[in-house]
Amino acid sequence: MAGWAVVRRMVSHPLGREFYERDVVEVARDLIGCVVEHDGASGVIVETEAYHDSEPACHAFAGLTPRTATLFGPPGRAYVYRSYGVHAMLNAVSEEEGVGAAALIRALEPVEGISGMRARRGVERLRDLCSGPGKLTQALGVSLGLNGVDLASGPVLIRSRPAAWQDVAIVAGPRIGITKAVELPWRFCAAGSRFLSRRAGPA
């Protein structure tokens, strides 16, 4: 894994605000193949979903509240919230400030800090470490206390695609695990990845 770290840092850099200050659907798609890292562990993003305040599946649909304030803030920040009272969920705030939009990071292919991921998750099989939005935050040690941090300066970083992922094939389809706006094709997956939270393709 040390070799991967050296190569990645030679060809990859933290994504700046301009990357996120765009249509959230484009951001969610373009995050596939990028690298998330925190606390000595990292993984390549293989699955995302886009959420926008214009549609009812997004937390920001209800407007500006203490919970959604980060969503309406500067692009390029982490929006971390608790799902079902258990799991932290990592999102990348997108579009211009004042618009509530974010890309949910749904799954990673683990690449660094595997032993630490296994210890945090309590599982051994590589494909089970980050194959879901709650799993990946547990594996990386991302907690609610990181809500609002800058994804370009850390401690949670998202880096650009390394060379091996520049031309990744991407499959789009409906978002999963929601009951509203289910028709929107705003879920993006790395084609053929075995690390997805659920098989890619039509619902």
Image: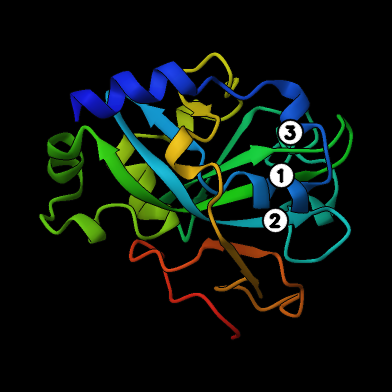
Q: Position of residue 96 (x, y in %)?
A: 87, 32
Residue 75 visible here: no
Disc nearer the start of the sequence (1/2):
1
Residue bearing mark 1 = 27
Seen at 47% across and 27% down, the residue is: 145
Q: Is residue 178 left or right of residue 105?
A: right
Q: Amino acid at mark 1?
A: Val
Q: CA distance from mark 1 to mark 3?
A: 6 Å
Do the residues bearing badges 1 and 3 touch, measured as CB atoms within 8 Å? yes
Q: Quadrant of the N terminus?
A: top left
Q: Is disc 1 placed on a helix, strand or loop? A: helix
Seen at 40% across and 53% down, the residue is: 134
Residue found at the very far top of the displayed protein: 153
Asked whether 20 or 179 is in front, the reply is 20
In the picture, residue 139 is in which quadrant? top left
Residue bearing mark 2 = 50
Q: Is disc 2 placed on a helix, strand or loop? A: strand
Q: CA distance from mark 1 to mark 2?
A: 8 Å
Do the residues bearing badges 1 and 2 touch, measured as CB atoms within 8 Å? yes
Residue 15 vertical placement versus 129 (above, below): above
- Which of the labelled discs sits on residue 132, or is there none? none
Q: Is disc 3 placed on a helix, strand or loop? A: helix
Q: Is residue 108 left or right of residue 65?
A: left
Q: Amino acid at mark 3?
A: Tyr
Seen at 22% across and 25% down, the residue is: 3
Q: Is residue 34 left or right of residue 107?
A: right
Residue 84 vertical placement versus 140 (above, below): below
- Which of the labelled discs sits on residue 20, or is there none? 3
